[in-house]
Image (cartoon, grey):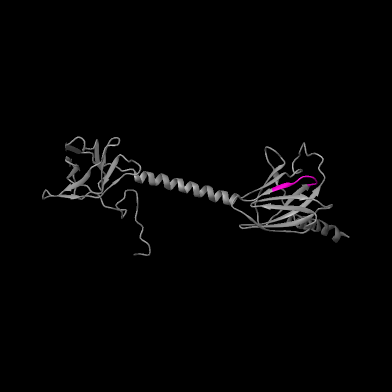
């Protein structure tokens, strides 16, 4: 008799553990209306939905999901209508207690369905009326938030890289005012010439040591369309629009400049070599 008394608590413990292992999860009511439920998706968990005779329940899955197949234990007891990532269910038969599996293009969902008469449809209490069940995906939402934060960080970094860092403002101009920029500077690699408004931008030539001229590559700064980026630094540039001519002189010219560490001729853009080539 004494041995049985000692074994009883162990039996109760095992029974409680078995019960908890078989427990289903009931969606929780929302803060605005308890009839609108929310539950975090767990592929290893069965979700319990309590239907009510005379009422339908709307189950909403992820926005990127489409229902592919539905298997239900008692087809006569429930009306089931899928529409893309939405599922509408309504109890029909008596004792409408069964299970249901929903397979979408992304996930698998398992449900326990039960139904009873509603006595408080106008005044819902927690976990009574199920007008809507919304699945949430915390892992996916966290990954999305991290990806958005990383994208914002990279965008901010690229914006910083795209902004030229002036190291030399010691430029002066001679010649036609129509052709001359309102400001000029370089960052040790490129020369930047700024023009006001919609003024026509000139062709730009580098003046070689022997006095000859060579056309240089230029681009218009996409973020600052009033600025020409000259892909060179030089002691002197000649700017031409038709017969109008101006010269730009770099008083702090350094022929060495700074090293090109990005491998490209576009500021803020780095060259990545794949496969060791």
Residue 221 image point, x, y percent: 32, 44
Q: Is residue 54 magenta?
A: yes
* Left or right, residue 243 beside residue 144: left
- Kindly give the residue lying farthest to the left in the view shown: 210
The location of residue 193, given as percent across then percent down, is 25, 41
Residue 256 image point, x, y percent: 20, 50
Task: Say which residue appears at 53% left-offset and 47% top-offset.
Answer: 145
Range drawn in magenta: 52-58
Q: Residue placed farthest to the right in the image?
A: 1
Where is 232 relative to 199, above or below?
below
Q: Residue furthest toward the front?
A: 242
Q: Nearer the viewer, residue 104 or 256?
A: 104
Residue 103 higher or lower than 181, as above or below = below
Residue 132: x %, y % from top left: 70, 45
Tally of numbered discs: 0
Figure quadrant of the C terminus: bottom left
x 51%, y 49%: residue: 146
Figure quadrant of the N terminus: bottom right
Residue drawn 29% across and 52% down?
265
């Amino acid at each position: 008799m004494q041995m049985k008394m000692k074994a009883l608590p162990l039996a109760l413990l095992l029974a409680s553990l078995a019960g908890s292992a078989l427990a289903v999860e009931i969606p929780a009511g929302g803060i605005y209306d308890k009839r609108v439920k929310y539950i975090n998706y767990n592929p290893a968990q069965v979700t319990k939905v309590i239907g009510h005779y005379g009422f339908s329940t709307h189950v909403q899955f992820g926005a990127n999901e489409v229902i592919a197949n539905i298997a239900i234990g008692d087809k006569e007891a429930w009306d089931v209508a899928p529409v893309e990532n939405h599922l509408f269910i309504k109890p029909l038969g008596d004792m409408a207690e069964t299970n249901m599996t929903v397979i979408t293009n992304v996930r698998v969902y398992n449900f326990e369905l039960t139904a009873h008469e509603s006595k408080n449809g106008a005044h819902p209490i927690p976990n009574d009326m199920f007008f809507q069940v919304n699945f949430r995906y915390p892992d996916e939402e966290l990954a999305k938030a991290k990806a958005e934060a990383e994208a914002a960080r990279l965008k901010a970094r690229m914006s910083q890289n795209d902004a030229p860092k002036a190291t030399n403002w010691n430029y002066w101009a001679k010649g036609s005012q129509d052709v001359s920029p309102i400001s000029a500077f370089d960052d040790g690699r490129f020369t930047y010439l700024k023009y006001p408004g919609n003024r026509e931008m000139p062709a730009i030539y580098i003046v070689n040591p022997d006095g000859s001229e060579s056309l240089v590559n230029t681009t218009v700064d996409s973020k600052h369309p009033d600025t020409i980026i000259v892909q060179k630094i030089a002691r002197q540039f000649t700017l031409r629009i038709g017969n109008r001519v101006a010269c730009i002189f770099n008083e702090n010219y350094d022929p060495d400049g700074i090293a090109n560490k990005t491998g490209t001729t576009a500021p803020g853009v780095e060259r990545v070599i794949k496969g060791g080539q």
